[in-house]
Amino acid sequence: MHSKISMAEIYIYIFIAILTVVTLNSNIAFGGNRKVGVGAENLRIIEHLTQHSSKSKNYRKTPKGYRSHGYAVTGEISGDLAYLDYKFPLIDSAESHFKIKLNKHNVSSIVSEFGCKADCYRPKDEHSYEFATNDEVYLKDNMNKDGFYFESFEEGKYGIDYNHTINISSELSIQIASFIKNELVKKGKDTYENRVRGALNFVQFIPYGIPDFDNEQDCYFGLALPHESLAISYSDCDSKSTLFASILRHLINPENIILVGCLIEEGAHMIAGVTGFNFPGQYYHYMGKDFLLIETTTPIPLELQPSNRFQQIEIIPLKRT
């Protein structure tokens, strides 16, 4: 014999059902301002800021491997501008609040300076790229611009000019670096170590995701420019390492910073290296200095960087402007 369900129980079931639907169909997660995916407002912002770019990009593809670290860049659009807002733990777990306004004409101009035509270099599958032609003369004439380079088919003689992407983003990185320095000065903690730590935290706590902005005309080798990383609120290993280096070069001597291509268990990877530390971790001796190899993709403090993880090191020195 079945027992009767009271009206009070019915109301409880209805409440649970409604709560479940709301939770599953929202971007809200409990704890901080954690997000379960790329926000619709972030997509609106990046498309607004890049609407005048000569490079076509598809920002609507779902980033692979997306994960949040409890913080995200938010923002809103007003006329030609987008106002971005990012809280992150600067040092000692204390949050700092970075705000910036970006102009759509300026950002569109910067985004126009990076990209490779698909008739030179194109996606092979979801994990790799390939040359679209075997004509070296054509590649030298058409690939050596907009942040890419080609010297020959030999490994290491073609790819992204990361110094180019850093240089075109200098206006943004200077503002971020100035903010970090001023915050440290206000706290009475403006040291070499804390400048590195502050820049690293700024980058590490941005959500992780592998960008795929390619379309039929242009490819971008999975790199998000610093403006894109902030506006869309996610970034991957080379995008984050580039952003980290672009900020840090305005806080310490650029000769103390390197970008590092390497291999890890999962495959090709990019990190950064900074000299001047005695923390445990993996070091690489370069130009008479020992560089601590630093993971930029996920929140790992300087004193807990991995040891013996990075293999087949390839150094990309930062050029002076």
Image (cartoon, grey):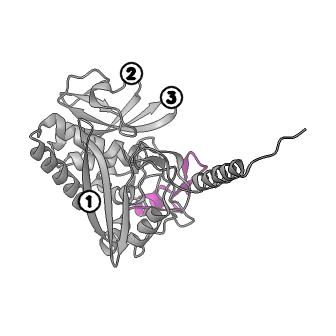
Q: Residue at x 42, y 47 (%)?
A: 207
* SS for callout 3: loop
Report the residue marked by disc 1: 99
Hey, what amino acid is under mark 3? Glu
In the image: residue 288, left or right of residue 32: left
Tell me residue 163's x, y (percent). 29, 51
Tell me residue 112's x, y (percent). 38, 68
Instruction: Pick the residue in front: 304 or 310.
Output: 304
Instruction: Pick the residue in front: 36 or 139.
Output: 36
Confirm whether the magenta stretch covers residue 4: no
- 2 vs 1, front mark: 1
Q: Residue at x 41, y 50 (%)?
A: 33
Report the residue marked by disc 3: 265
- Mark 1 or mark 2, which is nearer the start of the sequence? 1
Hey, what amino acid is under mark 1? Lys
Tell me residue 206's x, y (percent). 38, 48
Farthest residue in the right direction? 1
Category of crowding for the residue at label 2, using alpha-carbon neighbours closer than 10 angstroms: few (below 14), some (14–19), many (at least 20)? few
Quadrant containing the C terminus is: bottom left
Quadrant containing the N terminus is: top right
Residue 317 seen in render? no
Instruction: Pick the residue in front: 119 or 186.
Output: 186
Numbered circle sitting on residue 53? none
Start-end of magenta stretch: 112-141
